Image (spheres, rainbow, N blue to C red):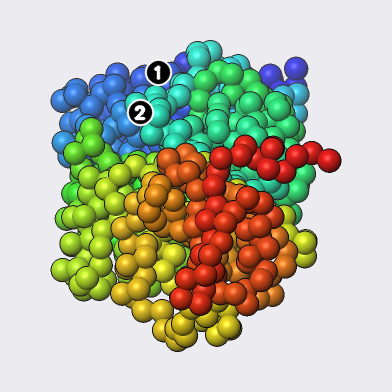
């Protein structure tokens, strides 16, 4: 009753509230699905409104008026982000885009660099103490509300009351318009779900249990979240909560228990989606909403250990520069806070960032991995800040890599149709060696099934996967870490150099169905090092010649036996019926590995070496019967 008395003189109709706005005013409008649609439409219809400048972070309702010449004469729009509904208007020059990090927008208002006369916001009904909630739109709305001379609030019972720094007292609001209407909803469509799911598959491979995630909004991030259902103990510190998070919360995948900053709470600035997600965050203490200058601050982001930033892009050039807000000269979306989350992830203990994008655009006719960014394209993220880039063709790791390595990594994940042209462009820019071969022009998704993991006797885990052209430098480091004796056992001669030409011959353009090299990688001080290599190459009589290299400190741990079993499975799949191997007589350890797996092998001396012939005729269970 006391609150009702306090606000009775502030309660007005929408036309009465809008009439308080003077000609020439600078008006801030709340963001995204939390925007006050009834107030916006009343404002647009009022012929008294003249020369009004509108500021908004993410605009939905105003898109309805972009073909109305009268509206565009009376209002000018300045947007910090261009929504899908506003792109056509942006391309036609009907709106003005302000490229600003979302975390810095509150300071633009606080410093009066962008002065505000009026703020139009939407809130929940006041509680018995007079507090309304900004609900699903805290982001830059709190700062807009605080810095405007006049605050007009649409009070909507459908606006959730969210926890965190979301509350505005009725004393801070000048005019209250009680109007119930459904909140705006925004659920992205997925035009190519197969591509999105392949990208999500690779991204999920990088996300480990216990990580804290920041995930951008859009078609691709939506699918990525859907594909994390097999993870455990994830946390959230992100810009936006969407419907895609709900199953992960409901199934306990996201529980925020292992977060090092604000554990037990999912931290965000706004929420966009369907009524389902609005109901889910309503009065839910698991969520903590706060303004973007806090949530998106790199120093705050970095307080989360193992923070993984996942965002999308429009283009990535061969040096690692990322464009996320424009298609050439046409502004397409906004820089948002991609760079801040990426920097925060880099500063996070154990954290890293992922840029995910389809390999092509325009129905496969244009590559998104490009020699150089399109003319007019803006650099949203610098090449020095980028870590992982993921397409439906795999993962490129750029952090700490040279331009040559970046070219190879990125070409490897480009669409097969464009790989050769990318390599030729890189040669013309002198990014790579003039004799560099392009990766094979085929989809190598089938290589994923050849990945495995071996638990070593020393307690470490070794990841096993096919070698790729981008592994040239890692293999070089592995080669030079080996003793001369180990190299001699493998190559039967002293080899003191492993040149680029040798790497080209082995792996630049591998036909993985005829030849296969598996590498074993072990974590060492924040990165993975090659510790073992197992190779087979096409031989005669439907056999493949097999060979192994294992770093000395890991020999005797069963690695060669494990890799031999994996190679056999791949060789069988590719039509081979057996292996051959040439071994030095003194290499008894390798001979025992072969004898153990192939008791019926045959041997003969050739030029002082032992030629071993092994057949796959026995099924594995017969070769090694259960005891």
Q: Name the residue rendered at 51%, 77% in the picture.
A: 608
Decide if residue 319 is in sight here. yes
**Circle 1 SS class:** helix
Residue 256: x %, y % from top left: 72, 42
The residues bearing labels 2 and 1 have C-alpha atoms spaced at a distance of: 44 Å
Q: Nearer the viewer, residue 438 or 595?
A: 595
Q: Nearer the viewer, residue 99 or 17?
A: 99
Decide if residue 173 is in sight here. no
**Circle 2 SS class:** loop
Give the labeled residue for mark 1. 15
Vertical comparison of 236 with 250: above or below: below
Mark sitting earlier along the chain (2/1): 1
Q: Is residue 177 left or right of residue 384?
A: right
Q: Quadrant of residue 11?
A: top right
Q: Is residue 472 left or right of residue 481?
A: left
Give the labeled residue for mark 2. 192
Q: Nearer the viewer, residue 85 or 362?
A: 362
Q: Name the residue rendered at 42%, 21% in the picture.
A: 37
Q: Name the residue rendered at 47%, 27% in the picture.
A: 33
Residue 31: x %, y % from top left: 46, 34
Quarter of the picture containing the C terminus is: top right
């Amino acid at each position: 009753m006391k609150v009702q008395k306090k606000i009775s003189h502030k309660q007005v109709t929408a036309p009465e509230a809008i009439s308080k706005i003077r000609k020439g005013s600078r008006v801030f409008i709340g963001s995204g699905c939390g925007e006050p649609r009834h107030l916006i439409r009343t404002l647009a219809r009022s012929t008294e409104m003249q020369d009004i400048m509108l500021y908004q972070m993410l605009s939905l309702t105003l898109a309805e008026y972009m073909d109305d010449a009268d509206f565009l004469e009376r209002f000018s729009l300045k947007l910090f982000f261009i929504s899908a509904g506003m792109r056509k208007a942006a391309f036609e020059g009907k709106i003005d885009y302000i490229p600003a990090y979302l975390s810095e927008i509150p300071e633009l208002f606080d410093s009066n660099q962008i002065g505000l006369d009026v703020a139009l916001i939407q809130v929940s009904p006041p509680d018995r103490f007079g507090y309304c909630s900004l609900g699903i739109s805290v982001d830059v709305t709190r700062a807009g509300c605080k810095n405007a001379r006049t605050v007009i609030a649409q009070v909507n019972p459908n606006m959730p009351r969210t926890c965190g720094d979301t509350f505005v007292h009725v004393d801070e609001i000048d005019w209250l318009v009680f109007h119930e209407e459904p909140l705006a909803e925004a659920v992205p469509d997925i035009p190519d779900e197969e591509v999105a799911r392949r990208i999500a598959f690779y991204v999920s491979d990088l996300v480990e249990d216990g990580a804290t995630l920041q995930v951008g909004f859009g078609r691709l991030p939506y699918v990525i979240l859907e594909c994390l259902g097999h993870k455990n103990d994830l946390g959230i510190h992100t810009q936006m909560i969407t419907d895609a998070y709900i199953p992960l919360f409901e199934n306990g995948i996201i529980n925020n228990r292992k977060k090092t900053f604000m554990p037990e709470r999912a931290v965000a600035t706004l929420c966009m989606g369907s009524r389902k997600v609005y109901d889910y965050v309503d009065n839910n203490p698991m969520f903590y909403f706060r303004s973007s200058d806090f949530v998106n601050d790199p120093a705050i982001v970095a307080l989360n250990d193992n923070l993984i930033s996942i965002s999308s892009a429009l283009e990535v050039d061969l040096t690692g520069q990322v464009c996320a807000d424009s298609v050439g000269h046409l502004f397409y979306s906004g820089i948002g806070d991609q760079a801040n989350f990426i920097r925060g992830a880099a500063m996070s203990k154990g954290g890293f960032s992922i840029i995910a994008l389809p390999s092509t655009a325009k129905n496969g006719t244009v590559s998104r991995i490009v020699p150089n960014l399109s003319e007019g394209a803006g650099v949203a993220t610098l090449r020095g800040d980028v870590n992982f880039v993921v397409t439906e063709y795999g993962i490129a790791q750029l952090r700490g890599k040279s331009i040559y390595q970046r070219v190879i990594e990125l070409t490897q994940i480009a669409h097969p149709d464009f790989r050769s042209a990318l390599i030729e462009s890189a040669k013309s820019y002198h990014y790579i060696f003039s004799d560099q071969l392009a990766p094979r022009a085929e989809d190598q998704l089938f290589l994923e099934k050849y990945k495995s993991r071996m638990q070593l006797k020393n307690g470490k885990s070794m990841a096993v996967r096919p070698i790729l052209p981008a592994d040239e430098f890692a293999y070089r480091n592995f080669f030079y870490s080996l003793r001369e004796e180990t190299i001699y056992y493998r190559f039967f001669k002293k080899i003191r150099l492993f040149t680029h030409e040798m790497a080209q011959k082995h792996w630049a353009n591998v036909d993985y169905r005829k030849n296969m090299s598996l590498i074993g990688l072990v974590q060492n001080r924040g990165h993975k090092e090659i510790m073992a290599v197992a190779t087979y190459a096409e031989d005669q009589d439907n056999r493949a010649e097999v060979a192994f290299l294992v770093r000395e400190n890991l020999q005797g741990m069963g690695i060669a036996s494990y890799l031999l079993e994996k190679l056999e499975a791949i060789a069988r799949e590719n039509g081979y019926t057996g292996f051959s191997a040439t071994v030095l007589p003194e290499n008894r350890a390798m001979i025992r590995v072969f004898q153990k797996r192939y008791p019926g092998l045959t041997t003969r001396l050739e030029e002082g070496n032992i030629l071993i012939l092994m057949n796959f005729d026995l099924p594995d269970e017969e070769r090694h019967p259960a005891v």
